Amino acid sequence: MEDYKFLFKVVLVGNAGVGKTCLVRRFTQGLFPPGQGATIGVDFMIKTVEVEGEKIKLQIWDTAGQERFRSITQSYYRSAHALILVYDISCQPTFDCLPDWLREIQEYASSKVLKILVGNKTDRDDREIPTQIGEEFAKQHDMYFLETSAKEAENVERLFYEIAAELRDQARSKDASVSSQQRTNHSDSIGLSSLSAKANYFSQNNCCTGGASSN
């Protein structure tokens, strides 16, 4: 039986055709599937990563973007630790639909879920959404931001490894806060260290913040 210290559920959402499945396949299998068809319902992959000597198992759920599958995919939001909202930088309509996806996230996901906005397909020459626009949208909606290319493997491992590291830090901070609360019986201290750890982690690593560079 595989040994791991943390187990986290990561769910990818976004319009059909933005490259969610290709991102998952690139990360979990190291390949870019040409002519990838649309996901039917929900697909599921597992990969264990190591962060600072600790094994972290990621359950990665790849959801269908088509409207007819929404009632199925919405049920996967509830237990997610992280939600990756993906758009295609070369397709304006996929960016225009982001507010609709955020409304679903707010309705069905935990208020504490880690949210990451990803602009995919940076390998394309026909960009329609500038990096700055994606960064500003992420900042307005309290999300982390990164641009990727599943085809060229740009920032794909970085995306998932830093999500794993951030979720681990949150879990540690939560455990530390609970222990402190039990000792001091001051319940209002819960979660404060987690927020501090999150801010420090991403500022030091220059990734996934609204104003960070995407390269």
Image (cartoon, grey):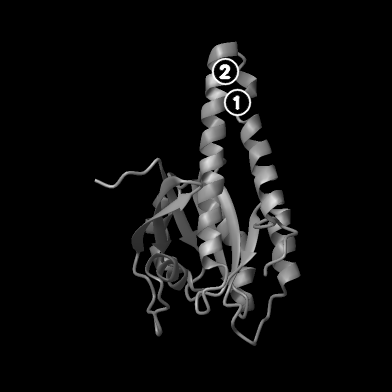
Residue 137 x/y as whole percent:
71, 61
Alpha-carbon span between mark 1 and mark 2: 7 Å
Q: Residues within 10 Å of mark 1 (few under 14, many from 20)?
A: some
Against 121, residue 49 (above or below) is above
Q: Is residue 104 left or right of residue 68?
A: right
Q: Is residue 129 left or right of residue 66?
A: right
Can residue 117 be seen by looking at this rendering? Answer: yes
Amino acid carrying mark 2 in the image: Gln
170 vs 94, nearest the viewer: 170
Residue 116 x/y as whole percent:
59, 56
Can residue 104 be seen by looking at this rendering? Answer: no
Residue extending farthest to the left is: 1
What's the residue at 49%, 62% (across, down)? 13
Against 188, residue 84 (above or below) is below
Residue for badge 2: 181
Amino acid carrying mark 1 in the image: Ile
User: Mark 1 touching mark 2, by CB under 8 A?
Assistant: yes
